[in-house]
Amino acid sequence: MRIVQIIDSLEIGGAEKMAINYANALSDKIEFSGLVATRAEGKLKNQLSNSVSYLFLNKKLTLDFAAVFRLKEYCKENKVEYLQPHSSSYFTAVLLKFIYPKVSIIWHDHNGLSEFISSEKSFALKIASFFFKGIIVVNYKLKAWAKKELNCRNVVYLPNFTTIDNSTSAETILKGELGKRILCLANLRDQKNHFFLLEVAEKLKQSHPDWTFHLVGKDFEDDYSKQVKLSIINKHLEDSVFVYGSKNDIKNIINQSDITVLTSKSEGLPIALIEYGLSKKPVVSTKVGEIPLIIKDGINGFIVDANDADLFYQKVVRFITESDLRAQMGDSLYQTVIENNSEEGVIANYLNWILSL
């Protein structure tokens, strides 16, 4: 089997990380594993295995036919059978299908908001889906949506998996007091709902001012980012909430934290949650997407409705005041992730599904 992942960029993000994970995991299980970055490279490129074939298209335009022809030559040269575009990269794969019809497209949908996308984008995706051989989704709601709305009936749910990269050198030093840090791994975008986190931070500053929040994830420096940073100032949280942008040394950053959080209002299955679990960190999260399939409230973490900042704050405080509970739930989450989100199990199911198409 000869499979190539396609991703828009290799900047740090959930879909980007999964493209890397699939390419690396397949490299010793199939005949040929490749990865194509269409528009931009980024920090995640360093995590790509040497056994994975790599191509950067350097796509400049939405309709960049020169880039599509470069992709065609790459696929012909390497006898690629399957393209696995992640998220919006399906557009490039469909353009290739017109001029290289022998390749099959497996679309990988990571976006927890897919069922809420605009009618214009939905129409484009519906048309594109005629050319899909299969669709991978990361939550069951997306599976139901895809089967109902798209023109491809081969839809499978496969949970995200990840590994902790031990090769990246430790560079980031988190601010705040050692032993009193709360980490949020999430790109600065509306879906991740950092304003909810700031509500919680405002409450915590009153009761536990020595505890600090640390926001790590890509800063798009757009209106949302500006509003988040302005809100930090307006709420007088400059010494309580710190924004770092994209970082590559995630294991080092997680190891410096004591409590981890996710405040999203929509999700698939966040890679950050799996990374928290692999590092045995206690988690407080909003109850969205597939998160409740991983976190069982009060057993291996806490989950709270996405609009209940008071209860979220109370759960964070409970972890602050009960260090034994932090360790216990961190260990329990680790066991859950190992049992349900292992690379070996997901990849085996993936390959069996492709063979069945």
Image (cartoon, rainbow, N blue to C red):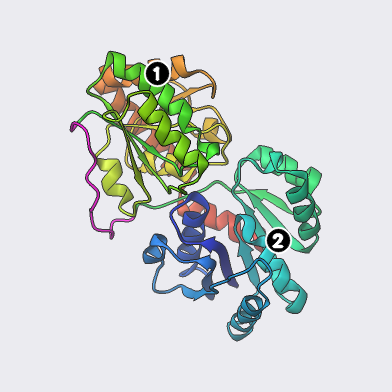
Q: Position of residue 133 (x, y in %)?
A: 74, 62
Q: Residues within 10 Å of mark 1 (few under 14, many from 20)?
A: some
209 sits to left or right of 215: left
Q: Which residue is rendered at x = 38% and y = 61% of the image? A: 43
Q: Position of residue 343 (x, y in %)?
A: 46, 53
Tell me, yes or no, if residue 122 can be seen here: yes
The residue carrying mark 2 is: 356
Q: Is residue 144 above or below residue 52?
A: above
Q: Is residue 86 above or below residue 319?
A: below
Q: Position of residue 168 (x, y in %)?
A: 28, 59
Name the front one of labels 2 and 1.
1
* Dot 1 amino acid type: Tyr
| Residue stretch in magenta | 165-178
Q: Earlier in the sequence, mark 2 or mark 1?
A: 1
Closer to the camera in the image, 69 or 319 = 69
* Dot 2 amino acid type: Ser
Give the dominant element type of the magenta stretch: helix, strand or loop: loop
Q: Secondary structure at mark 1?
A: helix
The residue carrying mark 1 is: 313
Closer to the camera in the image, 229 or 40 = 229
Q: Secondary structure at mark 2?
A: helix
Which quadrant is the C terminus positioned in? bottom right
Examine the image and state in which quarter residue 96 appears. bottom right
Q: Which residue is rendered at x = 33% and y = 19% of the image? A: 204
Q: Residues within 10 Å of mark 2 (few under 14, many from 20)?
A: few
Q: Are marks 2 and 1 in contact (CB under 8 Å)?
A: no
